[in-house]
Image (cartoon, coloured by chain):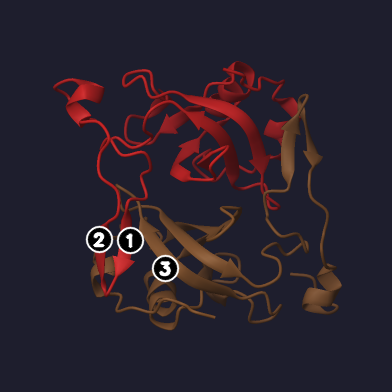
Chain colours: A brown, B red
Amino acid sequence: MTEIATQPNDVLAAVKFDANGLVPAIAQQHDTGEVLMMAWMNAESLCETLTTGRVCYYSRSRGGLWRKGETSGQTQHLKDLRVDCDGDTLLLLVHQDGVACHTGRRSCFYRAARDGGLVEIAAPEVSPEALYGQKHG
Amino acid sequence: MTEIATQPNDVLAAVKFDANGLVPAIAQQHDTGEVLMMAWMNAESLCETLTTGRVCYYSRSRGGLWRKGETSGQTQHLKDLRVDCDGDTLLLLVHQDGVACHTGRRSCFYRAARDGGLVEIAAPEVSPEALYGQKHG
């Protein structure tokens, strides 16, 4: 699995973190274009992502680094990293092992607006129990 | 141009707006998969987007509704709207008239991490002056 790994200094300098020290990061499957998820990074997780080539977010609920796939095995391998015009959003082009969503679906964006409501347009590919054992999270 | 327009009630109920009443919205060109930009919506702009089929954001800098393309002509036509598993991020599948970025580029994500720095991987397709007249914004 080819991953990019680079020195993070100039990238970090270009990113405008918010008042909480975070920046939103969109993960997109690099070859199919599927948008998989959006999560947050702080400077440390961005630095780790760039230097290791494995995507690491910052978990706002847990208040710490979230190495994607560490528990579930559903790792994201960094293929390219883009910074937007304002420096306040990141686009990660990744190879997603397995599924991105904690529900067992490939993408977190599996509910679509239809006729005033939301309908599920994708089914789980794996059960959350298989990903996380008894603990679902 | 076929746009979706729907009643927003159940969609609004499923969205978890943050402490500022906002939710991040990713815009993706519906047929090519290109991620164009990320901006924010409040309940009013989301409601307007769903009922009109034209994408309307909330401008944090201006503190008001931002009907994409109202000044520049670079309208986004809504093709589909997705809500993520946690209800705290939206994915808009759109048809982008012209360019999404205020710099005149198709996508806002035109800077890529390379060898520790950032390089521009896309050139402007139109000048900001042509989009906005003398005022660039």
Q: Residue at x 25, y 44 (%)?
A: B123
Q: Are marks 2 and 3 in contact (CB under 8 Å)?
A: no
In space, the residues marked 1 and 3 are separated at their CA atoms by 18 Å
> Which of the two discs, 2 and 3, sits closer to the camera?
2
Please tell me which of labels 2 and 1 falls first in the chain. Answer: 1
Q: Residue at x 50, y 78 (%)?
A: A54
In this rendered view, identify the residue nearer to me: B87 or B55.
B55
**What's under tag 2, amino acid-wise?**
Val
What residue is pinned by disc 3?
Answer: A42
Q: Element at badge 1? A: strand
Q: Element at badge 3? A: loop
Where residue B83 sits: x, y (%)?
Answer: 67, 43
- Mark 1 belongs to chain: B
The quadrant the C terminus of chain B occupies is: top left
Q: Are marks 2 and 1 in contact (CB under 8 Å)?
A: yes
Where residue B136 sits: x, y (%)?
Answer: 19, 29
In space, the residues marked 2 and 1 are separated at their CA atoms by 5 Å
What residue is pinned by disc 1?
Answer: B112
- Crowding at label 2, few (<14), some or many (≥20) Cα neighbours within 10 Å? some
**What's under tag 1, amino acid-wise?**
Ala
In space, the residues marked 2 and 3 are separated at their CA atoms by 22 Å
Q: Residue at x 69, y 81 (%)?
A: A71
Where residue A55 sits: x, y (%)?
Answer: 51, 73
On residue B119, the disc is 2
Where residue B24 sits: x, y (%)?
Answer: 51, 44
Does any portion of residue B136 appear in the rendered image? no
